[in-house]
Image: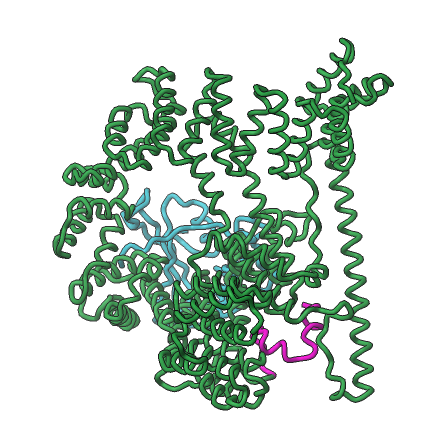
Amino acid sequence: MKGSRIELGDVTPHNIKQLKRLNQVIFPVSYNDKFYKDVLEVGELAKLGTKMLNHVLNICEKDGTFDNIYLHVQISNESAIDFYRKFGFEIIETKKNYYKRIEPADAHVLQKNLKVPSGQNADMQKTDN
Amino acid sequence: MPNVQLPPKESNLFKRILKCYEQKQYKNGLKFCKLILSNPKFAEHGETLAMKGLTLNCLGKKEEAYEFVRKGLRNDVKSHVCWHVYGLLQRSDKKYDEAIKCYRNALKLDKDNLQILRDLSLLQIQMRDLEGYRETRYQLLQLRPTQRASWIGYAIAYHLLKDYDMALKLLEEFRQTQQIPPNKIDYEYSELILYQNQVMREADLFQESLEHIETYEKQICDKLLVEEIKGEMLLKLGRLKEASEVFKNLIDRNAENWCYYEGLEKALQLSTSEERLQIYEEISKQHPRAISPRRLPLNLVPGEKFRELMDKFLRVNFSKGCPPLFTTLKSLYYNTEKISIIQELVTNYEASLKTCDFFSPYENGETEPPTTLLWVQYFLAQHFDKLGQYSLALDYINAAIASTPTLIELFYMKAKIYKHIGNLREAAKWMDEAQSLDTADRFINSKCAKYMLRANMIKEAEEMCSKFTREGTSAMENLNEMQCMWFQTECISAYQRLGRYGDALKKCHEVERHFFEITDDQFDFHTYCMRKMTLRAYVDLLRLEDILRRHAFYFKAARSAIEIYLKLYDNPLTNESKQQEINSENLSAKELKKMLSKQRRAQKKAKLEEEKKHVERERQQKNQKKKRDEEEEETSGLKEELIPEKLERIENPLEEAIKFLIPLKNLVADNIDTHLLAFEIYFRKGKFLLMLQSVKRAFAINRNNPWLHECLIKFSKSVSNHSNLPDVVSKVLSQEMQKIFVNKDLESFNEDFLKHNATSLQHLLSGAKMMYFLDKSRQEKAIAIATRLDETIKDKNVKTLIKVSEALLDGSFGNCNSQYEEYRMACHNLLPFTSAFLPAGSEVGGHSAALNHTANCDVLASEI
């Protein structure tokens, strides 16, 4: 794909509605207003990651056809690695030069086994975390 | 009363009074005045009384101030101090003409008084008495030849009087005294050189200007301007090769300035479009990221070459994601061939991008990111909106919104489309959605407020603006303080549509006051700019102020004010009630009683509100006054408060209208509406020669203008109805009207107009109105003409159709309710989304045509 430029911006009380809109469109669940109030108060979206990951795990559980979930994390991102390990993910591999534009370029592959007997392997990719 | 000389003790006190005044220590100054005046020998001392008055003026006690100053002057008419003080007093009240007279009197008594001369010169330039200004500056120069402001002021006087020779002589003399060593950079010297050069260029002395700029260029700070002047002068002198070098260098500095390309083309004198394309190609290679060398060729080439270049241009910009892409191409939309090429290219991109990630199905290589399709759809929405195909435009914008519901530009565009369709409420709703996505963005907030005003949602608009205005004051007040005229002019139109004439007039006057203030504010710059040597900026300021009321904001306010005053003249409001006459025959006694009591309640409520507001205003004024007294600032006099109810019941609306008209006649004489508004005023005043002047000027601008046509017919009828005009006047009238009507009687004149404009609904409407006006028995035929909607009519757009339907309702065709209904239905079929034509009971689109028809409209209006 041609250079799709991605930039990060802060969520503030001024543009919180854009986050709401995104959630409405992307997720089948709509969050109530208290959720967004919390988002703003905490400042750094703490717990949002937990909520989202739980949400994903729930979806996989309900669906029942998923065997594993795996993702890539930059090897220097210790907080992300710790975060996922708390949810039962483990480092199963390290890929060299996975990232094109950041240093270090290597990434760990973390995987969680969902222990579902059927043979399907679905992967859910996450970008830098 | 003979002038009493003050003995040494009092004389010292007097000197101290003057010092206190200069240092703004007003309370002390008054103390010293008291010391002198309490002594019975000097209780009537003119100059002391005058100074007391002047000091009191600075403390805001205007009436007392005038008393004392006048008394002092009476006691000592031969004192230049008294006259000077009186002049200062007048100046502080902005009575500049009076002040000039006072200063002149003072100067008669003390010819070489520097302070008075300086003050006089400031007033003269403020009032643009250029001859007087020159004289005064000459005197100042003679008295103080070593002061540089003397030379500069004198030179500027000649410059403004267009005596370039003298101005340049003076500037050169002065420049030579400045003795700046050639390797030193001094900003003020640099500005002086540039000013000198500007005078040369205005005098068409191109050779001198070029030599001058080359001689002094090392000492000029604004290097860019030096190059630009060189380029311009070389062109004017026909030295094209050198000119082209200069422009090429300028383009290297900044490849996006279209003036440089224009200059380059003039210098190269290329004839064929191939040659011109070649140049843009080269420049584009040297500046690959510049947009202009890719955009400008699109203006030059037709057909296949256009398609090729446009294809490249569009692809690059869609990939990159360029939100204003349509705006940059909009100027090409006068050319039908180019429009269809663009349409073909972009709709094909859209179709392709939806299925595969390429601009066309036959490509490979890197795929487009998902945003490309988004920008393509956004572009198509704007494209079809421009072409009036609103359904299609909505389809595209909705598709874009479905994929990216957080992009503010999309909702902004959707709102715009609804505005063009004529559904202003829906437009405001979508603009509200847009601003809610980023409430820190003042631009979108203001746009939302504007769209609300267009939909007559005045309260909501004020609330929207209050998210950014200062805390503690109402948004309306703050916006007035900040001279936020876009808001005020939109309010004027909204109030006008709602029939709230008093409120509208208040805003018109507020806008007028801003223009007065802006004109007045230049006063301090007369001394400041000469001191700082920023002479080019100073002269630009003077020239701007000369044509200030040419600005669109003034025109809007003035036009609305005149329209309203005309309406108020035709239908004055009574003192009793603000509401329309009730047709009591149609209501039963019970209904009538109910309505009357409702009116009384509404009136009482309005009165209570008004009183509350009045008390609040008084309280605020008291606070402000207290503040002012404490701060001891110089006051310029409280402006009289603007009260809507008073404004709309003014005694002489036509006189007020003329006040707004005069600057338009002076500064906007090229706009036909100026003259037509003038006609409407003079028509009601019965001033035949002025009516003639107005229609003649309008005729010279555009003889086929629909409104002018109506004015001409009304004029002619009026002239023939007035048989008792003086001979001279009659003669002139018939002579001039002969040139316009050429022996035709009015009916034929009107018939010809209709025939000549058979495909333009705007013109047909005017012709039809006049047909009814000239002969009421032809009502049916007239209405039939105005309501034509057949294929041949070229301008069946929202605006024009609404105009026709409003005319059917406002009595231009007499009583025709059933025809109006028929017409409304037909228009609704043509334009199903337009609010004005929706059947009664659906959402009102906020058009006054519908509102005026209900008896409750004013009750509604006052509750909005």
Q: Is residue B436 visible?
A: no
Picture quarter containing residue B159? top left
The magenta region covers B841-864
Q: Is residue B802 located in the magenta-colored stretch of the structure?
A: no
What colouring style does the render use? Answer: by chain
Residue B355 lies left or right of residue B854; in this view the side is: left
Q: Pick out the residue farthest to the front.
A: B727
The location of residue B718, given as percent across then percent down, is: 54, 74
Query: Considering depth in this image, is B636 or B268 the residue closer to the camera?
Result: B636
Q: Is residue B845 magenta?
A: yes
Q: Which x, y percent locates residue B393?
A: 39, 72
Residue B67 sits above or below residue B402 on the image: above
Considering only vertical position in the picture, is B750 above or below B656? Answer: below
Q: Is residue B520 left or right of residue B753?
A: right
Name the one closer to the observer, B694 or B665.
B694
Which hue belongs to chain A? cyan
Query: Which percent across, then down, holds residue A89?
Result: 43, 56
Where does the N terminus of chain B fall, quadrant-wise?
top right
For the image shown, how many numbered marks are present on the structure?
A: 0
Q: Say if B713 sits above or below B263 in the image.
A: below
The residue positioned 51% from the left and 59% from the top of the image is B447
Q: In this view, which residue lies farthest toward the top? A: B8
Q: In front here: B394 or B656?
A: B656
Q: Residue at x 76, y 9 (%)?
A: B8
Q: Is residue B740 visible?
A: yes
Instruction: Determine whether, in the image, residue B270 is placed left or right of residue B230.
Output: left
In the picture, the quarter occupied by the C terminus of chain B is bottom right
Q: Colour of chain B?
A: green
Residue B17 rendering spot, x and y as whole percentages: 73, 19
